Image: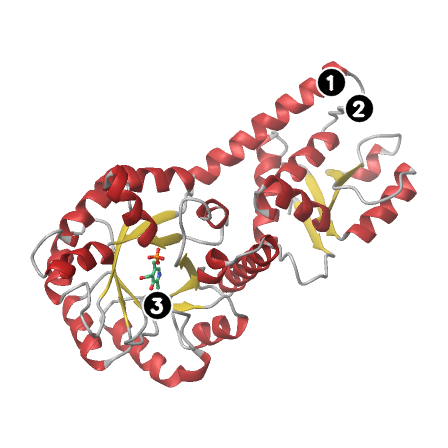
């Protein structure tokens, strides 16, 4: 057990993915060639770290990270394999993350690396050359972490509904969402999403039937839980379905499903789909009640609704909504659900969501199609993928 992880940060926000932090610490130990060693990682708040800072460094106020080496000093035998403790203030990490416009977990990674290097004997306060040596090593480890993340990179699924919206505006056969799906896949998208609405305002039955034959990655059929569409889905057998609430008058899907309020009905749809080998995702708001209900009725995935984060009009609101997504994705992940996210994501707000290791896939439609009008669909998809790295 090389990582002794303890989370003493008791505040509701920001939520920390404990699994992710201890997995990262373990990976860093291996990178540093110290898989044999043990490391204690403690997450605290500003008040707690300020007390430690005062006691051990005679400095007032909070700091971001403190390292306490057990391999320094005389009593090395007591340390055994334990390198020492890294104490991180989540409050300070969150403030620094906001300033740098990165996620709290990205900032926690930087602080973990910094704290670990201190335990391994690096010390930027010793001399300029030591500082240079430490910062070089820091950059090297962070690059390795990034490389690892890229290997486990979050996938992009492109929603091609709006190609059909344009076609239907003319009532002719162009542009064809089937062709668009192929271009998206060639550009690197790993899934195609279509919403077959009850009113057939954009995607038609014909589109789904042909896409079933042509999509080489994964066809995700978004749909309301109504009998006619359920029957159609069972006939077509997409790779997965995403159940969404559907109102006739809405311009686009307006909110998440109230899973908790219709468990029996949704459970029935899920088991019908599962019996036919089709996994089900439930599109829900970032709300723990909906996550629990989704888990209880046997959903395979949840798709976290990112709309409120994307539509937020102040920095404060953006931060609050983002933290709700972080917490919901972690709750769902820890409950054993697979986690996707989407709605309203664009070329400005996607990177932060894509940085969450709990999320497997983003479903993005409108922003990609809007950009494609000006730069072409291939480039619009590639640019979005670039932002997700
Ligand atoms: N996910 C779901 C469940 C949706 O209903 C939509 C919109 O069709 C999206 C993702 C994509 O949203 P956007 O078009 O805003 O990217």
Q: Position of residue 59 (x, y in %)?
A: 89, 38
Q: Which mark is drawn over residue 253?
A: 3
The Cα atoms of the two marked residues, 3 and 1, are separated by 55 Å
Q: Is residue 42 visible?
A: no
Give yes or no for contact between labels 2 and 1 (Cβ–Cβ under 8 Å).
yes
Question: Label 1's element?
Answer: helix
Check the picture and name the quadrant holding the C terminus. top left
Q: Position of residue 83 (x, y in %)?
A: 74, 36
Density class for disc 1 (Cα within 10 Å; few <14, some 14-19, many ≥20) is some
Q: Is residue 96 above or below residue 227?
A: above
N-terminal-most mark, 3 or 1? 1
Which residue is tagged 1?
130
Furthest residue to the front? Answer: 170
Q: Is mark 1 within 8 Å of ligand 1?
A: no
Density class for disc 2 (Cα within 10 Å; few <14, some 14-19, many ≥20) is few
Please tell me whether mark 3 or mark 1 is closer to you in this view. Answer: 3
Q: Residue at x 58, y 53 (%)?
A: 19
N-terminal-most mark, 3 or 2? 2
Which residue is tagged 2?
125
Give yes or no for contact between labels 3 and 2 (Cβ–Cβ under 8 Å).
no
Q: Is mark 3 within 8 Å of ligand 1?
A: yes
Q: Position of residue 82 (x, y in %)?
A: 74, 40
Image check: 330 left or right of 378?
right
N-terminal-most mark, 2 or 1? 2
Image check: 81 left or right of 341?
right
């Amino acid at each position: 057990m090389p990582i002794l992880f303890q989370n003493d940060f008791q505040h509701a926000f920001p939520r920390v993915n404990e699994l992710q932090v201890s997995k990262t610490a373990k990976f860093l130990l291996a990178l540093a060639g110290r898989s044999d060693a043990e490391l204690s990682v403690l997450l605290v708040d500003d008040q707690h770290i300020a007390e430690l800072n005062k006691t051990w460094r005679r400095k007032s106020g909070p700091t971001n990270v403190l390292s306490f080496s057990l391999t320094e000093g005389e009593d090395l035998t007591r340390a055994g394999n334990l390198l020492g403790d890294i104490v991180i203030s989540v409050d300070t990490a969150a403030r620094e993350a906001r300033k740098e416009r990165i996620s709290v977990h990205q900032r926690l990674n930087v602080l973990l690396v910094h704290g670990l290097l201190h335990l391994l004997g690096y010390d930027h306060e010793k001399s300029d050359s030591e500082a240079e040596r430490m910062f070089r090593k820091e950059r090297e480890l962070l690059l390795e972490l990034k490389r690892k993340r890229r290997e486990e990179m979050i996938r992009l699924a492109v929603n091609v509904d709006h190609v059909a919206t344009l076609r239907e505006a003319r009532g002719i056969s162009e542009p064809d969402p089937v062709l668009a799906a192929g271009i998206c896949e060639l550009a690197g998208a790993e899934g195609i999403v279509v919403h077959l609405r009850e009113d057939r305002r954009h995607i038609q039955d014909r589109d789904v039937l042909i896409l079933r034959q042509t999509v080489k990655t994964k066809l995700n059929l978004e749909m309301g839980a109504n009998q006619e569409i359920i029957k159609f889905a069972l006939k077509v057998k997409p790779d997965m379905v995403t159940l969404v609430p559907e109102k006739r008058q809405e311009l686009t899907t307006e909110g998440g499903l109230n899973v908790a309020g219709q468990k029996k009905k949704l459970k029935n749809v899920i088991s019908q789909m599962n019996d036919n080998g089709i996994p089900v995702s439930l599109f829900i708001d970032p709300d723990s009640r909906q996550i629990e209900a989704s888990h209880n009725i046997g959903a395979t995935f949840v798709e976290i609704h990112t709309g409120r984060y994307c539509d937020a009009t102040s920095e404060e609101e953006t931060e609050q909504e983002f933290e709700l997504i972080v917490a919901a994705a972690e709750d769902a992940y820890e409950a054993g659900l697979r986690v996707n996210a989407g709605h309203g994501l664009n070329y400005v707000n996607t990177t932060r969501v894509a940085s969450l290791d709990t999320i497997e896939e983003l479903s993005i439609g409108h922003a990609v199609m809007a950009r494609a009008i000006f730069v072409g669909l291939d480039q619009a998809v590639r640019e979005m993928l670039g932002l997700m790295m």
